[in-house]
Image: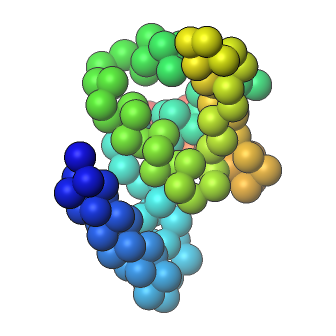
Amino acid sequence: MLLREQIAAIKNAVMASRVEREPCPVARTLNIVGERWTILILRELLTHDARKFQELETSLRGISPNTLSARLKHLEEHAIVERRFYEQHPPRAEYVLTAKGRELGPALRALRSWGEKHT
C-alpha cells in the first residue's frame, strides 16, 4: 500500500506542477475540472446543498464508483469540494462545494445556456 501512496503522491506533484507551469488560465482551469464527469459532479453539487456519494452515483448514470471517487478526490485536492462527515460510526460523508467551487457556478450556467441554445 505504501508504494501505491508514493506513486499517487508523485502523480499529484507532477499534475500540480503542470497546472502551475501552464501560462493560459483556461488551460490551468481545464487541467483541474476538464476531465470527463467532473463538470457533471460540479453541476450536481451546485444544484444541491450537499450530496452523498451514493446520491452522486445515482444521479450520474454511467459513472463507475472508482471514477467518481477519483474525481471527488481530485476536486478535494484543489479545494473545490469538501468532504463533511455527518456520522461517526460507521463514518458517513457528504460532499459540498467550497466557496472556491461555488465560483464555478457562472461558468457552468454559461455552458448550460449555450447547450440550450445550440444543442
Q: Tell me, yes or no, if residue 117 can be seen here.
A: no
Q: Tell me, yes or no, if residue 71 can be seen here.
A: yes
Q: Nearer the viewer, residue 69 or 5?
A: 5
Horizontal and vertical percent position of residue 32: 47, 60
Q: Quick check: 78 left or right of 47?
A: left
Q: Quick check: 6 left or right of 105?
A: left
Horizontal and vertical percent position of residue 98: 73, 46
Q: How many marks?
A: 0
Quadrant where the C terminus sits is top left
Which residue is pictured at 52% across the width and 34% down the height? 41
Residue 36 appears in which quarter of the rendering?
top left
Horizontal and vertical percent position of residue 56: 50, 20
Horizontal and vertical percent position of residue 22: 44, 84
Scheme of image coloration:
rainbow
Above or below, comparing residue 43 to residue 52 in the picture: below
Above or below, comparing residue 105 to residue 6 in the picture: above
Which residue is pictured at 57% across the width and 59% down the height? 78
Which residue is pictured at 30% across the width and 31% down the height? 66
Q: Nearer the viewer, residue 94 or 33?
A: 94
Residue 48 appears in which quarter of the rendering?
top right
Which residue is pictured at 63% across the width and 44% down the height? 81
Residue 62 appears in which quarter of the rendering?
top left
